[in-house]
Structures are given as structure tokens and as C-alpha cells.
Amino acid sequence: MRETPSTRWRIEPEAEVRGRIILAQEDHEIQSCYPVMAELRPHVQAEEFLARVRRQSGSAGYKLAFLTDGEAKAVAGFRVVECLAWGKFLYLDDLVAKSSDRSKGYGGELFDWLVEYARAEGCEEFHLNSRVQRFDAHRFYLNKRMFIECHHFALKLRA
């Protein structure tokens, strides 16, 4: 079997990487992502985080990866999916670096790892949505050679 990030989920650091990137599978690994993820998703309570991640993993193939250097420095929630419009692609739901560790390269290292993960999984594209007011995130993604491709529309079904 060809080794991919899915089959080798503990990626050892290269010389320039300060930490290592782990695909969280164990409960304690998932829970270690919560303090960083809560900075991006404050509406998700600590006591429900593990159950939500597990449920989304089962129903939508959601995965958590994190860059650790003694503690989680950056966290990404993502899934590999397929649709008629884009074929097989990696969808990045969440990407956040710990606020005290922003602009230190952790988010960039994790993003680059996700791009390689997508390639190894045979994805044709890499997609994400970013709220219109998140200008720093937009700058980050544009610097990573992403481009603005479409508008995302939403309709709230609950008040």
C-alpha cells in the first residue's frame, strides 16, 4: 500500500519545521486541539467538542490535524470529499493558530501540510470559505497562492 498522510498520520518534522503535525485520532489528541480551535469557534463548548468532532468524522469524514511543539500551536479541521463541480477535493473547514503564536509560521506550515495531504489523497483542488470581514485570513490565503473563485450564499433556517 502506498504511504499517504492517511496511512502515516504522525508526520515527523523536517529541518525547518519547529514542531510536528499529527492527524488527531485519539480522544486526548482531539481534546488537545480545543483551546486553539475555541479561538476560531468560541460558540463550541469544551464539553461538546469531542462529541461534535466524532460525529462529524463519522457523517462527513471530518478530520483534525494539529501542529504541536509541546502543545497545539495551530489546528485545522478538514475533509476530503467529491462533487460534480470540482471532482475530488480537500475542503478546509477550520484553520487557526494560537493567538499568542500567530505570525510565527505555524499556520503556514500546517496549511502547506494540508496541500500535500490533498495531493497524496488524489485531490484535484483545495477549497475553503472565509468570512468577508477576516482580512488577515484573506491576505494569508492569497499569499498561499489561493484565488477568489466564487461567492458563497447562505440562508439561516433557524432564528
Image (cartoon, grey):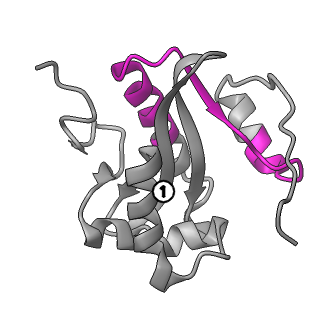
Question: Magenta stretch?
Answer: 110-138
Above/below status of 137 relative to 55: above
Please identify the quadrant where the C terminus is shown: bottom right
Please identify the quadrant where the N terminus is shown: top left
Q: Nearer the viewer, residue 107 or 43?
A: 43
Does 134 lie within the magenta span? Answer: yes
Above/below status of 152 relative to 98: above
Q: Amino acid under label 1?
A: Val
Where residue 35 appears, as percent x and y from the top left, is 50, 75
| Residue 65 visible, this angle | no
Other-residue count near label 1 (Cα within 10 Å), few / some / many at <14 / 14–19 / ≥20: many
Where residue 42 appears, as percent x and y from the top left, is 66, 75
Horizontally, is 100 left or right of 130 in the view?
A: left
Q: Who's the residue at 81% across and 26% down the image? A: 148
Q: Quadrant of residue 138?
A: top right
Q: Who's the residue at 67% across and 76% down the image? A: 43
Q: Who's the residue at 61% across and 59% down the image? A: 102
For mark 1, what is the residue?
75
Q: Nearer the viewer, residue 61 or 27?
A: 61
Horizontally, is 41 left or right of 48 in the view?
A: right
Does 94 lie within the magenta span? Answer: no
Horizontally, is 44 left or right of 14 in the view?
A: right
Horizontally, is 130 left or right of 104 in the view?
A: right
